[in-house]
Image: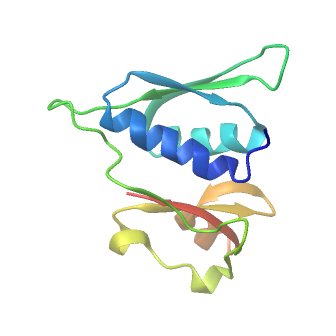
């Protein structure tokens, strides 16, 4: 069966695995999800990720990151733009998440990037999700 919102499914899997204290999770792979995982790794929210090829679409394995008290480094995830209602912003209108404590991930004409990088490059785009 086709999935209507694969990004929301990825975020939900990460949220649930963090609450269950899993070390890694497997997500059906795509280029967009791999880029989202790259941004999460660059910002320090996950330890690592790996794309595993198989005979179908591939598997994205995400390794979660915990601190010394075994609490998850991701406190919250929310999907901003949905398939039923897309959320586009110009570079001047990108708001910081939790006064700069979190990040927004945007899909721009130059690829997937954080809100800070999009503001510095003067790019707007679709806000995919907010993470703190």
User: For this view, does 36 lie left or right of residue 69?
Assistant: right
Which residue is most to the front?
1
- The answer to whether any part of residue 13 appears in the image is yes
Question: What residue appears at the point 32 percent right and 31 percent down from the top-left corner?
Answer: 20
Residue 70 x/y as whole percent = 20, 30
Does residue 131 lie above or below 39 as drawn? below
User: For this view, does 8 lie left or right of residue 3?
Assistant: left
Which residue is most to the right?
55
Residue 71: name its quadrant: top left
Residue 88 x/y as whole percent = 70, 77
User: For this view, does 70 lie left or right of residue 14?
Assistant: left
- The answer to whether any part of residue 45 appears in the image is no
Residue 12 x/y as whole percent = 50, 46
In which quadrant will I find the N terminus? top right
Residue 35 x/y as whole percent = 68, 42
In which quadrant will I find the C terminus? bottom left
Residue 69: name its quadrant: top left
Q: Nearer the viewer, residue 33 or 55?
A: 55
User: For this view, does 28 lie left or right of residue 71?
Assistant: right
Question: What residue appears at the point 58 percent right and 39 percent down from the top-left corner?
Answer: 37
């Amino acid at each position: 069966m086709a999935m209507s919102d694969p990004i929301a499914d990825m975020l939900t899997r990460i949220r649930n695995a963090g609450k269950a204290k899993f070390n890694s999770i497997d997500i059906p792979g795509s280029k967009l999800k791999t880029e989202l995982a790259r941004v999460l790794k660059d910002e320090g929210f996950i330890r690592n990720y790996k794309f595993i090829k198989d005979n179908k679409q591939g598997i994205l394995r995400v390794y979660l990151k915990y601190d010394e008290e075994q609490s998850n480094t991701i406190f919250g995830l929310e999907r901003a733009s949905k398939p039923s209602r897309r959320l586009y912003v110009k570079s001047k209108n990108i708001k910081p998440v939790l006064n700069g404590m979190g990040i927004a991930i945007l899909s721009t004409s130059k690829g997937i990037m954080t809100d800070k990088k999009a503001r510095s490059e003067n790019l707007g785009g679709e806000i995919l999700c907010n993470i703190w």
